[in-house]
């Protein structure tokens, strides 16, 4: 069975905690009000003075000088000053000329006066005067303790629920609870189910669409290759047929990438991919965009590093960035620099359009000058996030620079 505390709503728990806190504070206040500091001081000092009486009485009986504490004065009826003579037996506090404490007692019909300097009790004075700050400090500590205890008890189910959601575990806890945590857990569970259903429908759509397009694309590509081989060498239709072949191949690669992007990143097939051959392949494919343009395509890679990743998605990122640079650079150079797992693609083109902020790693908007070929920079960003890479973009009127950190950032 659930405890009474667990059956309470979150609002009730917090309310009860603060009520208990206020009760504790008011309890300290009431205790402090019941104590009279002067009475407490008088009681303690009087008790201290009375503890000296047995030794004084013994000394008087034996006729020896009584031992006196430091700062004390002792009188009988013959030696007592006139200012003290009128005090009756008992304890008295003298405010003038300074704080003194007087104990008057009688022994064998003789009256005696023990006068004690207030400096002797300065430590006791400080302790009594510090009682109020002590009460305040205790109230603060009590409030802190109750606050920590309350926050730990209240946030424990929220922390557990957040941890389960973050770890993507099922089922979510507290779904049968009747308090606010239960409402939140059920809302999370419902939202998670809706997202899974939506993702499942999207993956099914992408998969079905891709499979349905593969067959006609294969037919178009095969027919185009046949036309290219059958046309005479001097036919003006050969460039158009070759373009159909290239475009068909690009669409097939796009479909492959879309299928890979629809999968969970944890389930992607990863192999050791040699980066330099992959870059050289993309350079060869970019030659049509550099034809008849004074643009130098430079590869700076002193080594051939391998990267554990998905080859198709890595090829799509490099190809689209490189194609974009070659397509929009009218003159100058396009440089590819490879150093271990860091790839830098820079150009001397016009840079990104003003509508795109290169510092915001959001989905890129397509440029107005794009011809609709390739996945585009928006899909590049999706692939980078899908693979766990990092991409930095620096753009100006004199060129654009893409820096890819291709190690998975866990």
Image (cartoon, rainbow, N blue to C red):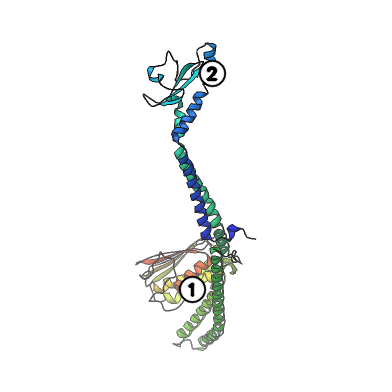
Depth check, mark 2 against mark 1: the one in front is 2
Query: What's the distance in space between the residues labelled 2 and 1, CA to CA?
Result: 113 Å
Q: Tell whether 208 sits left or right of 69.
A: right
How many other residues sit within 10 Å of disc 1, few (<14), some (14-19) or many (≥20)?
few
Quadrant, the N terminus: bottom right
Q: Position of residue 304 (x, y in %)?
A: 54, 63
Q: Is label 2 in a helix, a strand or a loop?
A: helix
Between 397 and 255, the residue placed more toward the observer is: 255
Q: Is label 1 in a helix, a strand or a loop?
A: helix
Q: Position of residue 396 (x, y in %)?
A: 36, 66
**Is 346 located above or below residue 150 in the figure?**
below
How many other residues sit within 10 Å of disc 2, few (<14), some (14-19) or many (≥20)?
some
Counting every numbered tag in the picture gives 2
Q: Quadrant of residue 133?
A: top left
Q: Is residue 24 visible?
A: yes
Give the residue pinned by disc 1. 284
Between 337 and 364, the residue placed more toward the observer is: 364
Quadrant, the C terminus: bottom right
Residue extending farthest to the front is 109
Q: Position of residue 63 (x, y in %)?
A: 52, 11
Q: Quadrant of residue 205?
A: bottom right
Mark found first going from the N terminus, 2 or 1: 2
Q: Is residue 279 visible?
A: no
- Tell me the number on the disc at residue 55: 2
Q: Position of residue 60 (x, y in %)?
A: 52, 14
Residue extending farthest to the right is 1
**Is 328 located above or below residue 109 in the figure?**
below
């Amino acid at each position: 069975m659930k405890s009474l505390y667990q059956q309470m709503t979150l609002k009730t728990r917090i309310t009860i905690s603060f009520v208990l806190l206020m009760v504790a504070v008011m309890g300290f206040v009431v205790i402090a009000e019941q104590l009279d500091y002067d009475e407490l001081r008088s009681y303690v000092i009087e008790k201290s003075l009375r503890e000296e009486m047995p030794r004084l009485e013994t000394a008087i009986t034996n006729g020896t000088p009584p031992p006196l504490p430091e700062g004390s004065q002792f009188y009988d009826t013959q030696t007592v000053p006139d200012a003290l003579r009128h005090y009756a037996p008992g304890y008295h506090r003298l405010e003038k000329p300074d704080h003194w404490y007087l104990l008057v007692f009688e022994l064998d019909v003789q009256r005696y006066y023990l006068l004690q300097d207030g400096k002797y009790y300065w430590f006791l004075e400080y302790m009594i005067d510090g009682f109020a700050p002590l009460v305040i400090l205790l109230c603060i500590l009590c409030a802190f303790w109750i606050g920590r205890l309350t926050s730990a008890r209240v946030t424990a189910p929220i922390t557990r629920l957040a941890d389960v959601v973050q770890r993507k575990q099922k089922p979510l806890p507290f779904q049968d609870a009747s308090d606010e945590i239960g409402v939140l857990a059920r809302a999370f569970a419902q939202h998670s189910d809706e997202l899974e259903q939506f993702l499942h429908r999207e993956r099914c759509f992408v998969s079905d669409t891709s499979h349905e397009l593969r067959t006609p694309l294969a037919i178009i590509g095969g027919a185009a290759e046949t036309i290219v081989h059958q046309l005479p060498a001097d036919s003006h239709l050969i460039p158009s047929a070759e373009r159909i072949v290239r475009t068909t191949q690009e669409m097939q690669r796009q479909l492959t990438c879309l299928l890979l992007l629809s999968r969970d990143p944890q389930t992607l097939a990863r192999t050791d991919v040699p980066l330099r051959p992959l870059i050289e392949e993309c350079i060869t494919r970019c030659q049509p965009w550099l034809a008849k343009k004074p643009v130098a395509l430079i590869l700076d890679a002193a080594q051939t590093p391998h990267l554990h990743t998905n080859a198709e998605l890595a090829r799509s990122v490099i190809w689209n960035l490189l194609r974009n640079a070659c397509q929009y650079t009218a003159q100058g150079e396009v440089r590819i620099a490879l150093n271990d797992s860091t790839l830098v693609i820079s150009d001397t083109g016009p840079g990104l359009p003003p509508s795109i902020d290169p510092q915001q790693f959001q989905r890129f908007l397509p440029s107005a000058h794009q011809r609709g070929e390739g996945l585009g920079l928006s899909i590049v960003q999706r692939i980078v996030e899908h693979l766990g890479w990092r991409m930095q973009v620096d753009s100006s009127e004199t060129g654009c620079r893409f820096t890819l950190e291709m190690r998975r950032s866990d």
